[in-house]
Amino acid sequence: MTNSALGKISSSNLPKKSNFKRHIGLDAITGKSNFDVGEYIVLRLLDTFQYANGPLALLLKDSIIRNLLLGQKLFNFRRGSSHKFNIDCKKEFSASVDASLLFCQLNSTPEYICKEFNFYHLAGERIEFGWLNDKFVSPIELYRESGEIDGNSPWEWRQVIKHDIAPIM
């Protein structure tokens, strides 16, 4: 459920609005600032309990897990050793959503990488995603192999090309 969806149904259960992700310009007042209420709740939990000792396990949409890791550079929560266990939500909950079990350690040195596993085959292949050299990448191993081609293109892209070919189209 998004903030705007709650507003459309005149819900009084809206989180206090603020630019806590520090977006600038149009991003601060448009869709980029419209976040998932579940994400807001998890961010509040992490902020409240980051100095508590122990593990934290939450069933979350994959987009929220990704956003938590994206925001780790901004918020620097004391959350370490993050693991994402992919779940077949259609099978388990009859829900058409990509969700996983997030398991992390609270009151730890902040980590910026998450290890991803299959919930049903823990010994199987896993990937890692997250921050590497100031870039958010997935999977990290493939980026390590091909990251040298990341960067500026030697060719200049013209944004007006779609207008140039409009008569042809």
Image: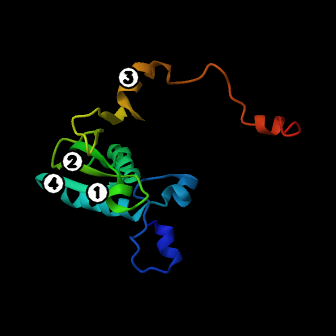
Where residue 164 sits: x, y (%)? 83, 35
Q: Distance between the residues labelled 4 and 1?
A: 21 Å
Q: How crowded is mark 4: few (under 14 residues within 10 Å), some or many (20 or more)?
A: some
* Labelled pair 4, 1 in contact (Cβ < 8 Å): no
Q: Name the residue under label 4.
A: 51
Q: Which of marks 3 and 1 is in front?
A: 1
Which of the two discs, 3 and 1, labels the residue nearer the N terminus?
Answer: 1
Q: Name the residue under label 3.
A: 144
In the shown orientation, is residue 76 left or right of residue 146?
left
Q: Distance between the residues labelled 4 and 3?
A: 33 Å
Mark 4 secondary-structure assignment? loop
Which of the two discs, 1 and 2, labels the residue nearer the N terminus?
Answer: 1
Q: Nearer the viewer, mark 1 or mark 2?
A: 1
Q: Name the residue under label 1.
A: 59
Q: Does residue 9 lie above or below 99 as drawn? A: below
Residue at the extreme left of the image, as rendered: 53
Which of the two discs, 4 and 3, labels the residue nearer the N terminus?
Answer: 4
Q: Nearer the viewer, mark 4 or mark 1?
A: 1
Q: Mark 2 points at which residue?
A: 104
Q: What residue type is labelled 1?
A: Leu
Q: How far apart are marks 3 and 1 (CA)?
A: 30 Å
Q: How crowded is mark 1: few (under 14 residues within 10 Å), some or many (20 or more)?
A: some
* Labelled pair 4, 2 in contact (Cβ < 8 Å): no
Where residue 34 sits: x, y (%)? 49, 61
